[in-house]
Amino acid sequence: MAHVEGQQHPIGIYLKIWGLLFVLSAMSYAVDYFHFQGYLRWFLIIVFMLLKAGLIVAVFMHMMWERLALMYAILVPTLLLMVLLGIGALEADYTFLTRGVFFMRQLL
Amino acid sequence: MAQANPTNTLEPVPLPEGVQGIVSDWSSDQRAFKNVPWGKAMMWIFLLSDTFIFSSFLISYMTVRMSTTEPWPNVSEVFALTLFGRKIPLILIAIMTFVLISSSGTMAMAVKFGYEKNKRMTFILLLITAALGATFVGMQAFEWTKLIVDEGIRPWGNPLGAAQFGSTFFMITGFHGTHVSIGVIFLLIVAAKVIRGDLDHERPGFLTGRKGKYEIVEIMGLYWHFVDLVWVFIFAVFYLW
């Protein structure tokens, strides 16, 4: 047989990850259902979100079996988005502050 | 000059691993992405650009939500449904999440059976994936109808609070729903190619004229899993915040 450039893995791993994604989704829904609030809510939401995203990319999209050259080419640029996230949060805080000042003046 | 021809030894040279592997893969005039069909590498590059688009939407949403002085509508209640005489918060979105995750599971198995050249199973699993995707879009249409007709939510304002709620909601879920719809169409096209035997007989594609290969099922799968991946983030930051 000719050289095959494909990803072949046993079906069991897909079924296990599928089940795990179901459990994680149910848990993130439970965060809302049982009205967790504050930092605990944020922590749980972000943890479940990143775990689900990681499982999908690593196993379903076969990233864990790819060579590092492809892995880094795709995943490292994504990290740059954290900068945009930081800028967005800074900008939002500033806008909120100036809006607060502006509307307070109108009331006085 | 009787020398042994070194090219006669056809043992493939093992590729270096780790950081050394990255350096050797990226250096010199050669293909950087080894063991990956070019179509798959290109799909990954496309998905990276799509990641930036969706991230821009979600980060803009964060920015407008953090900066508004109006109260944000209670998302948990807006998306509640009355089932069996009880009001359950966010239940429609939870069902949509499970539908999309299931479609990702069937897609992953379709890729596996595709590489085994199991035409029937690949076809069936691709059809199930498409059906689940269509179900998701249908539920989203129901959700939009409920919000627009019953709750009076518009992109420029709504009776529940901050106007930014409507604009970001329709923008983000609309863009995601479009991705799912396009995915369903392409799933049906790939399913038709599989069952017709286009991939077994390497028939040229209608649009690209390239030889049919089972790797297109995996490339289709990458797109579909990405749609599921984006939903994970939308579910967390839009519906659970």
Image (cartoon, helix red, strand yellow):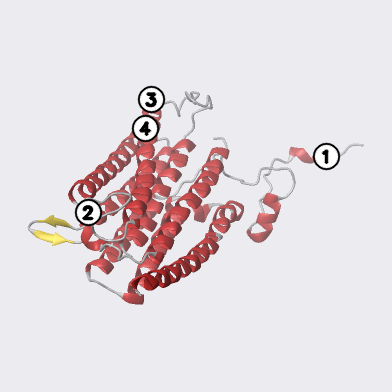
The quadrant of the image that shows the C terminus of chain B is bottom left
Between marks 1 and 3, how big is the CA–CA gap?
Answer: 49 Å
| Location of mark 4 (residue) | B191
Between marks 2 and 1, how big is the CA–CA gap?
Answer: 71 Å
Between marks 4 and 1, how big is the CA–CA gap?
Answer: 51 Å
In the picture, the disc for residue B92 is: 2
Give the letter of the chain under mark 2. Answer: B
Which residue is farthest left?
A: B85
In the picture, the disc for residue B196 is: 3
Kindly identify the residue that appears in the image at 39 percent across and 34 percent down: B186
Where on the picture, by quarter, is residue B218? top left
Give the letter of the chain under mark 3. Answer: B
Q: Is residue B223 above or below residue B69?
A: above
Is residue B109 at all visible to an observer of this figure? no
Identify residue type, mark 2.
Leu
Identify residue type, mark 4.
Ala
Callout 2: 10 Å neighbours few (<14), some, many (20+)? Answer: some
Labels 2 and 4: the sequence-earlier one: 2
Q: Is residue A106 above or below residue B213?
A: below
- The x and y percentages for residue A100 are 40, 71
Labels 2 and 1: the sequence-earlier one: 1
| Location of mark 1 (residue) | B4
Callout 1: 10 Å neighbours few (<14), some, many (20+)? Answer: few
Kindly identify the residue that appears in the image at 61 percent across and 53 percent down: A69
Between marks 3 and 2, how big is the CA–CA gap?
Answer: 37 Å
Q: Are marks 2 and 4 in contact (CB under 8 Å)?
A: no
Are tags 1 and 3 found on a single chain? Answer: yes
Give the letter of the chain under mark 4. Answer: B
